[in-house]
Image (cartoon, rainbow, N blue to C red):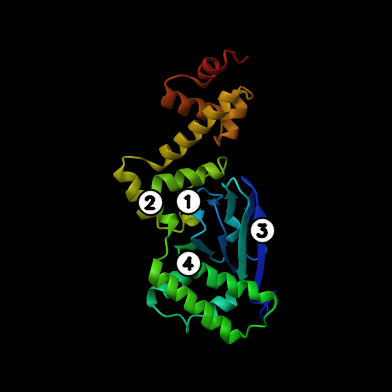
Amino acid sequence: MIGKKSFQTNVYRMSKFDTYIFNNLYINDYKMFWIDSGIAKLIDKNCLVSYEINSSSIILLKKNSIQRFSLTSLSDENINVSVITISDSFIRSLKSYILGDLMIRNLYSENKDLLLWNCEHNDIAVLSEVVNGFREINYSDEFLKVFFSGFFSKVEKKYNSIFITDDLDAMEKISCLVKSDITRNWRWADICGELRTNRMILKKELESRGVKFRELINSIRISYSISLMKTGEFKIKQIAYQSGFASVSYFSTVFKSTMNVAPSEYLFMLTGVAEK
């Protein structure tokens, strides 16, 4: 670590479709990153975020969310990803330096996993210059506090951070979450815990669409079961359990009420093979 163990800097070179996974070594700290050219996609393993970034984007992943994210290059040419790991203690020390109540709320809010700014290139160039200097210059703690608090305050005021986890509605968020662990016995408490939101908020949004929670979970699992059927590699019993149903009989009941045909018949229509 550099700068009294407050920072760690790395640059990763990525070819098209290469994926950089933000590991869980520093989950109690923050990660800030940007790419030098082209485009890449930031992906949440729970599917709550899938967002294309470019060389104007700066992303700050907040503590306890780092391990959920990965970055995939979509560029034909190689790109470089600059990543800074910033200690939680350093971020906390900035509170008295940052200008603007909005930036303070956004930076320290536990309800937002990340902040994203689409900046002008000169702002990114200044950040890159300071970060590149870590290897040769022994910056004082005071300089780093003044620089980063000033940088955060400036970009928030000029560009306004984007909370990209807010782009999806409740149904999409729940759907993506269930798909990420299809066999889990999802309950309201699990969903609300993962999404960091109140049950009444989610329930109200589902009710406004005439959708019941258990029906939504089952429809997601039925959709997944059909994708397994299309491969022609699984029997009904395997499909039922791999789709998250507790029993084959319950799977068959839900499937027939949804598709108006028994799963064995549907499998035959897809593959032409009758299950014995």
Which residue, given by chain and number where applicable, does mark 3 sit on? 12
> Which of disc 3 and disc 2 is earlier in sequence?
3
**Residue type indicated by callout 1:** Ile
> Which of disc 4 and disc 1 is earlier in sequence?
4
Tell me the element at label 1. Answer: helix
Q: Are marks 1 and 4 in contact (CB under 8 Å)?
A: no
> Which of disc 4 and disc 3 is earlier in sequence?
3
Which residue, given by chain and number where applicable, does mark 1 sit on? 191
Residue 98 visible to the viewer: yes
Residue 109 is left or right of residue 144, and the answer is left
Which residue is at a point 54% across and 69% down the rendered structure image? 125
- Above-or-below relation of 61 to 232: below
**Circle 3 residues within 10 Å: few <14, some 14–19, many ≥20:** few
Which residue is at a point 51% across and 15% down the rendered structure image? 269
User: Looking at the picture, how far across and down is residue 150, in whole percent?
Assistant: 48, 79
Which residue is at a point 47% across and 71% down the rendered structure image? 107
**Residue type indicated by callout 2:** Leu
Residue 2 is left or right of residue 50, and the answer is right
Which residue, given by chain and number where applicable, does mark 4 sit on? 110
**Residue type indicated by callout 4:** Glu
Task: Point out the frontmost of discs 1 and 4.
Answer: 4
Q: Which mark is residue 202?
A: 2
For marks 3 and 1, give the CA distance: 34 Å
Tell me the element at label 3. Answer: strand
